[in-house]
Amino acid sequence: MDGSWGPGFRHHENIYALTYSSLSCALCSLILDVVKPLLDKVTGITQGWLGLYPWSSRLGEQTGTSFITVFSEGVRYTYWGGFLLGKIPPHVLNICFQQPWTREGAFPPHSPQSHLIGGAPGVFRHIPSTAEDSAAFDTARAWMRECMDHHGDTCQRGGVGPLVLPGMLIDLGPHATSMPRLCVPPMSPITSFSYAALTHCWGGEVPGQTLLENVGARRQVLDVFELPANFRDAIRITRELGIRYLWIDALCIIQDSDEDWRAEAAKMAAIYSGAAVVVSAMDSNSSAAGILKPDRISSVRLNEKHIVQRGLPLFQHEVASCPLNQRGWCMQERLLAPAILHYGAQQLFWECRAYHAYEDGRLSLQGGTLDGEAGKFITLRQNILQSPTDGWRVWYRLVEEYSSRALTRLSDKLPALAGAAAIFRTARGEGTYVAGLWREDIVQGIVWGAHYRHYPSRKVPGYMLTDACAVLTRPPTRRAPSWSWASVDGPVIFGWTVHSSFCEFQVLDVTMRAGWNDYMQPAPAGSLKLRAQVAEAQYVPVEEYRDGGALIFQVGGHGDDEGIRLTACVMDFDRKVARACWAMSITPPSTNATWVLLVLHKREDGCFERIGLCVSWQASPVPDKHSLARERFVAQDITLI
């Protein structure tokens, strides 16, 4: 066997021996549970004899707290570090302390021994089989105390000045047996008020919502038996954390009152940023799924102090794939919260602006994650002013991530991002908000297109023949100007860098009839007056393209009978329908590089609407299609709506 795995123990001769032994041996049963899901994924992964090997770092230093299981023939399908197509990581099992958080082998992050958590020699903690175990609540309380006592301004709740509190909260009462009720929090200016908030997936219709007909009765008593499992569990968790008040959107906003919804939605940034902790139902795909899951992870007791349990995924991997991370509203809720207690499928996670902590004892002291732009922004918001260019780019990356998420109500497209826009504007210190973009960088902001799978190794940014592009749809009611990404539903990408000093159009005026610097405006309306190079063209679908087509420019005496064709054109809608259109040059055409163009539709009133994006590329100036097509363009003042 590969010597890089080091000396090990020959545990079983084959998968069949392991299966037989699992009937009477708890450890073998655990190992079988670890490898069983992989039997059908990679052919040959369980061939040969089974070896157990001490886990070693890349430097070869054995930690003594983890070991890996791998089959002698299956090792060829296994990788360690990095990523190899068609291969999987080794199966890791951890030797864990079973004592509660503050006892031997499990130190709170602020203690002198905290450097042992998550690194060599490594200290792991046993994860109770159920999230309702008292040890799990002990861990959550320890994290919250650590954050409150030692993180100071880093995890400051509510910002500077008086708190902006929700219109209603759930008062859980002074005792565990108290009947909850809806209450109106103090209205006078206060700087301290402790409450928890819940971030969760609605998952369709939510039973037990607060309505105009029951809000009066609920101010007397809130019957918990009318509530779905997520809400009952959130009440239990909040009480275990020692917090009396809880905010849940479906209960604390009158759901059939547009007036109350608008008032509370405008406070969303303050509600989540002011919470002492946000409870995250990250693994629950509906309000009925429940948060406090049983049977989280299996384990085997070795002795009075130690337990063996499977190694678990990193936080960024679990949060990136969880149901909660697919919802639009939940992205900004995570961005705004100073501290989040995540209830994952197999363990708890703590996420604050100082660090991430795992229930199994691992710790990331920097707080940054790799699970997408939302995770990175939690760290970036602290120093977003370091580079003005990077600052705007952060916003576009956030929009890309947000646009791939789902919303129950299509009209929430911009309100669900309002809190993120507000903190972005505050962190940056400048910016005029117009329909999901920023007036100061509108030249770049209007250059978006349907998302496509772009491989980092690709030398040319832009659409290619084999690209599968995201499907975009337009809501039944106009929601934003056509030049804004918010006018469509579906994943978008800002993959083409455009500088105001290197573009072929000039912004003469930005006019907003509704939504000027208004983060909460659900349907902004406005126009751009541009001085641009434009030309008439014909869009035709191209059979070889999966989702793209070509722009054809009629040029007298040049090209074939069909004119000059610029390929890599992806329309926002109706990609298989040929039509007359206009093209607007974004960047100057180049003989051996890309040429970015917006595709427009000219209305009867003379105004234009955006309908697509073309990113034409030519590797050789012979024939020079870009220069030939450019002859058809003329300077013109246009209005884009």
Image: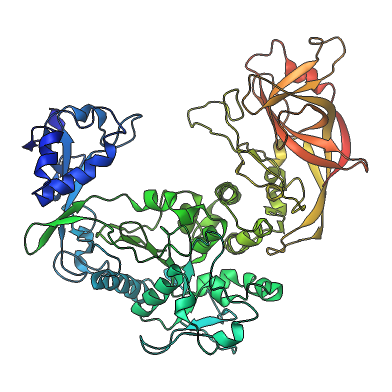
Nearer to us in this view, 146 or 439: 146
Q: Is residue 232 visible?
A: yes
Tell me residue 513's x, y (percent).
83, 59
Snapshot colouring: rainbow
In the displayed structure, 525 sits above or below 186; it is above
In the displayed structure, 560 sits above or below 517; it is above
Residue 640's image quarter? top right
Residue 618 as seen in the image, left or right of residue 13: right
Q: Residue at x 30, y 63 (%)?
A: 294
Residue 86 as seen in the image, left or right of residue 353: left
Tell me residue 130's x, y (percent).
27, 64
Image quadrant for the N terminus?
top left
Nearer to us in this view, 222 or 80: 222
Tell me residue 30's x, y (percent).
17, 49
Q: How many marks?
A: 0
Q: Is residue 184 visible?
A: no
Tell me residue 70's x, y (percent).
17, 36
In the displayed structure, 80 sits above or below 223; it is above
Residue 76 as seen in the image, left or right of residue 263: left
Q: Residue at x 18, y 51 (%)?
A: 94
Nearer to us in this view, 487 or 444: 487
Q: Residue at x 56, y 77 (%)?
A: 252
In the displayed structure, 450 sits above or below 395; it is above
Residue situated furthest right in the rendering: 605
Q: Residue at x 24, y 62 (%)?
A: 129
